[in-house]
Amino acid sequence: MKLKLKLVPGRTGTVAGRRRAVQAVVAAFVLALLPSAWTHAVAADRLRSTADAPATEVAVVFGAGLWNGRPTPYLARRLDAAAELYRTGKAKVVLVTGDNSRTEYDEPDAMRTYLTAHGVPGDRIVSDYAGFDTWDSCVRAKEIFGVKRAVLISQGFHIRRAVALCDAAGVESYGVGVDDEHDSTWYYGGTREVFAAGKAALDAAFKPEPRFMGPKEPGVSRALGALAH
């Protein structure tokens, strides 16, 4: 009696194909997380609270949206932290950087109004109207406003990327990540950071020029100079 083996066409190839597909997915996952790992590594020993932040001449607050012309709750918490750093003498000047690409949308002026209402003198606030994203804000802080060392203020899910990008732009940076309720916005921001970290890594590697560079502005040096007299 002869046994006949019945071969299943393509079975071996299918198993190998599935294995390759799984390996490809794992590789893609690892690659996707590498930029986030980079931001965490750069910022690992540079994150502080408002209580233990180092004294610096400049605190930088990144824009986080407006509601009816006023700072969103997320942005307001960033500004509260900046006001606290100013009151405790840990920051002499606050650089507010945000979007003013449309006449009806002016983040820096809204941030300035909030800070003055919370005790920061207007002549200690400098506005960057072309901070269209984190990389632009960091490059402009260094190249346009002459900031060499600063405390950066943002939410916890964003602050590592901010520190990493400002470091790449040549600003010695420390980060204060403000506390927030873990609501849908917080979770969205955390998820978005996985993808934003990829762009950040490309920005740090290739150092593109900001959307708008413009001439140097003496606002920070003028404010600091006034304090010296």
Image (cartoon, grey):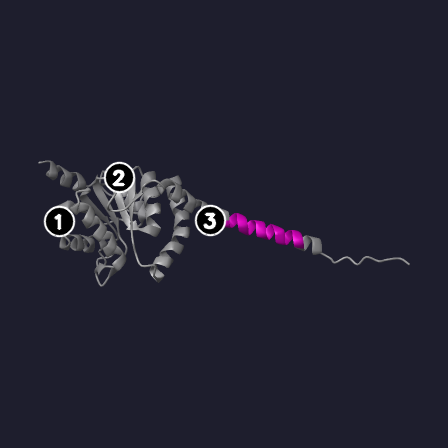
The magenta region covers 15-29
Q: In the orientation shown, which residue stands out farthest toward the left?
A: 229
- Location of mark 2 (residue): 142
Q: Amino acid at mark 1?
A: Gly
Calculate the distance from the C-alpha at mark 1 to the C-alpha at mark 2. Answer: 22 Å
Reply above or below: 60 against 189.
above
Residue type, label 3: Ala
Chain-order first, disc 3 or disc 1 = 3
Task: Categorize mark 2 by other alpha carbons within 10 Å: few (<14), some (14-19), many (20+).
Answer: some
Disc nearest the viewer among 3 and 2: 3
- Residue to which mark 1 is pinned: 122
Q: Determine the secondary structure under disc 2.
A: helix
Q: Amino acid at mark 2?
A: Lys
Query: Looking at the rendering, in which quadrant would you find the N terminus?
Result: bottom right
Looking at the picture, tell me which residue is in the foreground, 57 or 141.
57
In the depicted view, which residue is nearer to us: 48 or 108? 48
